[in-house]
Image (spheres, grey):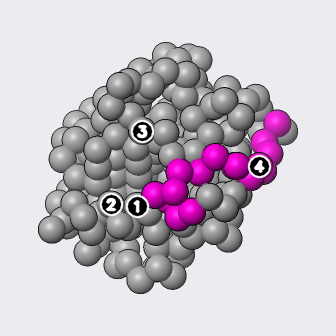
Amino acid sequence: MKIGILAIQGDFDAHRRRLEELGAGVVLVRKPEQLDGVDALVIPGGESTTILKVLGEAGFEKLRRFVLAKPTFGTCAGCIILANEVENPPQKGLGAMDITVQRNAYGRQIDSFIAPSAAVDAVVGGCRPVEMVFIRAPKISKLGPDVEVLARQGDDPVLVRQGHTLAATFHPELSDDPRVHQYFLKMVKNGTR
């Protein structure tokens, strides 16, 4: 199985290293046509408006068709891009997840923080806390009925799944804990059978 990582902006290399450590084949996707050669996609953190600008309309549409059909994992800015609705300020999303996301909801860069989660769903790999790195992180303010919450920070959902789509408001690629990426690889494996 080949996992694409949208390598336009953000810390895509940390995702590459983690996925390769877990035995996945990785393709750094820099052009929309490269999506044709991958089984799944990771949309990393970074600046969502910059990612959308670089994609352009044709790239956005190609990406939208991909994420509606194949397993996709978005972290931070990737979560924003996957959302049905984006606030603070409003922005176009791919509509791949029935969530509303508020950009930069925890504050500016200086307000970034690391937190363990006490409420990690057992499907991710037990009830041990997952270290979560929040950098100018978004908040998921509304969830559709088909969205499953896998982890919370306080009352806020921070790791969610809807069908073949996974989204985190934090950066699991920046922690030493591989469980979130392992969970995504299991989703991909189950989705490509």
SS category of the residue bearing label 3: strand
Rendering quarter of residue 81: top left
- Separation of disc 1 and disc 3 at Cα? 14 Å
Extent of the magenta region: 111-126
Give residue 131's mark. Answer: none
**Residue of label 3:** 148
Residue at (63% x, 68% y) in the render: 177
* Residue at x 41%, y 83% (from the top left corner): 23
> Where is mark 4, residue-wise?
115
Q: CA distance from mark 1 to mark 2?
A: 5 Å
Residue 104 image position (x, y, % from top left)? 66, 29
Q: Is the Cβ of the residue at disc 1 closer than 8 Å to that at disc 2?
A: yes
Q: Judge whether residue 117 is colored magenta.
A: yes
Q: Which residue is mark 2?
A: 187
**Mark 3 and mark 2 residues within 8 Å of each other at the beta carbon:** no
Kind of residue indicated by mark 3: Glu
**Could you tell me which quadrant the C terminus lies in?**
bottom left
Q: Earlier in the sequence, mark 3 or mark 2?
A: 3
Q: Is residue 83 left or right of residue 105?
A: left
Q: Residue at 62%, 58% (x, y): give it.
A: 127
Between disc 3 and disc 2, the foreground one is 3
Q: Position of residue 176 (x, y in %)?
A: 67, 71
The answer to which of marks 1 and 3 sits earlier in the sequence is: 3
Q: Is residue 142 visible?
A: yes
In three-dimensional space, the C-alpha distance between marks 4 and 2, rounded to whole angstroms, equals 25 Å
Q: State which quadrant residue 76 falls in.
A: top right
Q: Are marks 4 and 2 in contact (CB under 8 Å)?
A: no
As helix, strand or loop, the secondary structure at mark 1 comes to helix
Label for residue 184? 1
Q: Nearer the viewer, residue 147 or 71?
A: 147
